[in-house]
Image (spheres, rainbow, N blue to C red):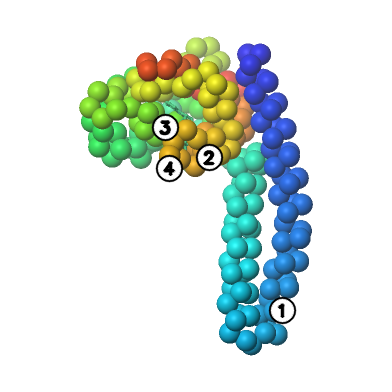
Amino acid sequence: EERDSLLFQKMAATGRLVRTLAHEVRNPLTNINLSIEQMEVDFEDEDAKFFIDIIRRNSQRINDLITELLNTSRPSEVTFSRYNLQEILESTIEQAIDRINLKNIKLISDYPSDIWIDVDKAKIQIALLNIIINAVEAMKEGDGILKINATQRNKSIIVSIEDNGVGISQEHIERLFEPYFTSKNNGIGLGLAATLNIIQSHKARVEVESELGKGTKFIVTFTLAS
Ligand code: ADP
Ligand code: MG
């Protein structure tokens, strides 16, 4: 509980910093872009065109990065409807099934068919898919076991996704949901940042239990409105 709310506070503070910084960078960038447009009209010289093009492309790149940063730091906008949880889980698993099969991972799923939940379906599928893909990526080919469970206890709906993969060190657990945190060579580190954003906008929570060399369990808990 304690650690969770600290993490949320930290994320909220990071989000504000990122948004402020992004807006501060965007203003001068707009001036640069306007100048480039004018230069493209004014300068005919091939050499000048060459350099203007470099400036234009790089300025575009900064702009794209800022857009991406803002998208991940902003609270996600959600539209809720009532869905059957089994259907949501099954269509999410379907999106990962090729990767699961490619690694010969054994999938063990267990969830009742009668749980109904108010969510933004597309968003919650992205959130769960990011967790599932990480689990798949953490497991070795051939002996991976992926367990996906859901249960309802009173007003809580609990979805858990468990793998027997590499596990996460304590040091890394603390940084898991930070944008751009990745331990992978070709990772981007935006998956879990997006997941946390979506889960928070559902007023749900996510917890992680992990042991190095043994595996990891992500637990997402939704609370039904009374
Ligand atoms: P990416 O997958 O691009 O690295 P994510 O935000 O999805 O970014 O994940 C961040 C990091 O969290 C991963 O690089 C990895 O170190 C760690 N991680 C997430 N899920 C797991 C898992 N199931 N097992 C081991 N490590 C994990
Ligand atoms: Mg990922």
Q: Residue 29 or 94: which is nearer the viewer?
A: 29
User: Which residue in the protein does label 1 denote?
Assistant: 38
User: Which residue in the protein does label 3 denote?
Assistant: 134
Establish if 128 lies above or below 61.
Answer: above
Q: Residue 111 or 216: which is nearer the viewer?
A: 216
Binning the other alpha carbons within 10 Å of mark 3 as few (below 14), some (14 to 19) or many (20 upward) gives some
- The disc at residue 186 is 4
Q: Residue 95 or 172: which is nearer the viewer?
A: 172
- The disc at residue 73 is none
* Residue 126: percent from left, percent from top: 47, 38
The residue mark sitting in front, 2 or 4, is 4
Q: Residue furthest front?
A: 47
- SS at mark 2 in the image: loop
Binning the other alpha carbons within 10 Å of mark 2 as few (below 14), some (14 to 19) or many (20 upward) gives some
Mark 4: which amino acid? Asn
- SS at mark 3 in the image: helix
